[in-house]
Image: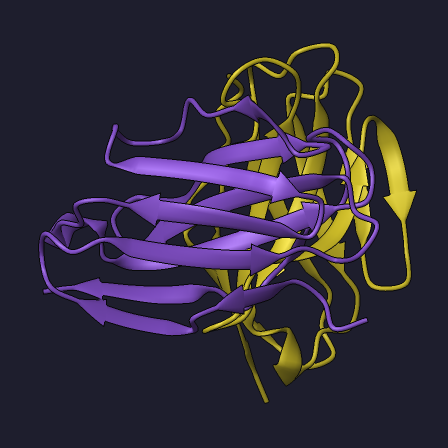
Chain colours: A yellow, B purple
Amino acid sequence: LAKTTQPISMDSYEGQEVNITCSHNNIATNDYITWYQQFPSQGPRFIIQGYKTKVTNEVASLFIPADRKSSTLSLPRVSLSDTAVYYCLVVGTGRRALTFGSGTRLQVQP
Amino acid sequence: DAGVIQSPRHEVTEMGQEVTLRCKPISGHNSLFWYRQTMMRGLELLIYFNNNVPIDDSGMPEDRFSAKMPNASFSTLKIQPSEPRDSAVYFCASSLLAGRYNEQFFGPGTRLTVL
C-alpha cells in the first residue's frame, strides 16, 4: 500500500500559483496518482489524475517526475474559493489500495 | 443529474440502536464506494462495489457494519448495534467505470452522532 505524505497546511494569497507536493515513495507500477479537493461539510471532489510526466486540465496541473515517488499539484492564480483541503492519493490494485492521506489545508487570503 | 444522493443527512441515535444509511448513486455508474471521515482517522474507505458486487470490504471495521447493494440504484450501510465511536460523517461515492482508478463523485454525506 503506497502511503502518501503531504504538508499539513499551506497559506497563499489571491492570484498566486500554489504548488502542493505529495510523497509516495513505495508507489507500485500500476498505481495512479489522484488529487481531490474538499470543502467544509461537502464530499471530496476530483481534481486531476495522472500516471507520469505532466497532466493539465482546466483547473490544475499535475507534475510527476520519472521515478514517480512524488507528485506536485499546481493551482494557477488561486482565489479565495480555492480555500479547501487537498488530498493526494495513490490508486492501485490490491486490497486497501484507495487510501486518502491526511490532506493539505490550503488557506487563501485576500 | 442530481448527483449522488444520501439519506439521511443527519442522524442522531443512542448507543445500541440500529442505524441504516442510504445511497443512490448517479444513474449509469457502475462502482459505488462507502467512506467514513473522522478528525482522528481522516477519510477511510469501508467497502466498494463493482456492478453491485462487493469487491473489497477490508475497510469495514467489524461485524457490526454491513453493506448491501441490491440493485444498481441503491445501497445501504447498516450499523448494528451502534456505538459512540461510530460517530462520523459517512460518504457514498460512485464512478462511471468499474474499479478504483476512475473519478469518483461523492455525495453530501451523512453526519452520524451516536450518543
How many numbered discs, if any? 0
Q: Residue furthest top?
A: A29
Q: Is residue A88 visible?
A: yes
Q: Nearer the viewer, residue A38 or B61?
A: B61
Residue B44 position (above or below residue B59): below
Which residue is rendered at x = 75% and y = 58% of the image? B26
Which residue is rendered at x = 35% and y = 74% of the image? B10
Quarter of the image where the C terminus of chain B is located: bottom left
Q: Is residue A100 visible?
A: no
Residue B84 position (above or below residue B101): below
Q: Position of residue A16 (x, y in %)?
A: 71, 72
Q: Nearer the viewer, residue B10 or A65?
A: B10
Q: Quadrant of residue B39?
A: bottom left
Q: Residue furthest front?
A: B70
Residue B39 position (above or below residue A96): below
Which residue is rendered at x = 29% and y = 31% of the image? B61
Q: Quadrant of residue A92?
A: top right
Q: Relative to A19, is B80 on the left or the right?
A: left
Q: Relative to A69, is A1 on the left or the right?
A: left
Q: Nearer the viewer, residue B50 or A59?
A: B50
Which residue is rendered at x = 77% and y = 39% of the image? B30
Quarter of the image where the N terminus of chain B is located: bottom right
Q: Nearer the viewer, residue B61 or A66?
A: B61
Q: Residue furthest bottom?
A: A110
Q: Position of residue B48 (x, y in %)?
A: 57, 34
Q: Position of residue A109 (x, y in %)?
A: 55, 83
Q: Position of residue A63 (x, y in %)?
A: 79, 39
